[in-house]
Amino acid sequence: MRVGLGLAALGRPGYINLQRDSHLTSRSVEGMQQQANSVMDALFQQSRRLSKEEKLIPWLDCARSYGLSEKFVGEYLKSNNVSPADVYVSSKWGYTYVAEWNVELGEGEPHEVKNHSLENFLKQLQETSEHIGEYVKLYQVHSATFDSGILTNTKVHEALSKCREERGWKIGLSVSGPSQDALIREAMQIKVSGQQRLFDSVQCTYNILEQRPHDALIEAQQSGMDIIIKEGLANGRTLSNPTLLELSSKLNCQPDQLALAAILVQPFQPRVLSGSVTVDQLRSNLGSFYSIEDPESMSLAEQLVSTKEGKEVLQKLMDSCKMESEKYWNDRSALKWN
């Protein structure tokens, strides 16, 4: 599927998405797992319903630091007897979840700790394998930065290449921050044994507010990398944008649908992750690319690229909402875990 389900907000009780209290009735392990199961149920149901000539494969994205996301996904798939051929699972290594299932921590205490060392890769690879190993199709470095050393650590590069060779998993990286474009370009140059490019994919923040990585994503896509977009709604911040509200009303669609459709039609041909925590949110997010009510009708994404009104809306949306990247990331860093 072009739209997948990210477990960042479902695998742990706290996250920085806005207004979580209005969507989550329980923050217990059992309550969060039940919530995750209901949203995963909806994803599989919609994938079956929307499949036409081509079968749509549900896509789930986890991370070692998304609380119990890998455990939730693994138990769900196994209990429902889902074949590895019938689901696409991606996960990430590099951060360790340390919040011990708390939403609020002491001042300065982190919810997750980054470590891109070889030792941590091997440790987290084993942990991922225990939970979802038979289902994984893509394993990603979580939030690669210049400072973390991952881009120059040849021992880790060799271990990642070995993982791909022995397990058949694609290898990717996710990026964050105002230097995403530079990180992508640097990652594209990394090769193993002087020949094969190390990274098969990049997961990047891109949305109507944060557009700086646009050109780098086109370059990555043209080089053969799979493009995955995270935080397409900017953790909920896009949904109060006046221009988005105006234009979504004009097209008679929901604001989240227009915000995600505007990403899906970009020339770097991305797949996009939904951060939904409820069935209704997921259903609405899927409406960005699929015609949920009438599978035979034109989708919103198609409208944006094939109708005069749609093209005008897309142009105005991207031109009017764009922020300076530094301000975008400063505002994001101020979001509180809730």
Image (tube, grey):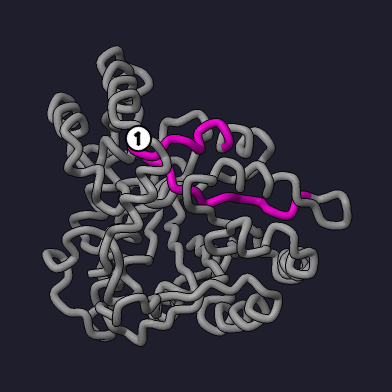
**Which residue is rendered at x = 58% and y = 76% of the image?**
133
Can the viewer see residue 33?
no
Q: Amino acid at mark 1?
A: Met
Q: Is residue 303 left or right of residue 126?
A: left
Task: Give yes or no for residue 59 being in the magenta stretch.
Answer: no
Residue 142 image point, x, y percent: 54, 64
In percent of the image, x 17 and y 42: which residue is there? Answer: 240
Query: Quarter of the image containing the C terminus?
Result: bottom left
Q: Nearer the viewer, residue 125 or 149?
A: 149
- Residue tagged by mark 1? 323
Q: Which residues are magenta?
A: 197-216
- The residue shown at (63%, 56%) is 146
Q: Position of residue 12 (x, y in %)?
A: 33, 76
Q: Is residue 302 left or right of residue 60?
A: left
Q: Residue furthest right?
A: 194
Question: Element type at marker 1?
Answer: loop
Image vertical order of residue 312 relative to residue 95, above or below: above
**Residue 326, quarter of the rendered image:** top left
Q: Residue furthest front?
A: 107
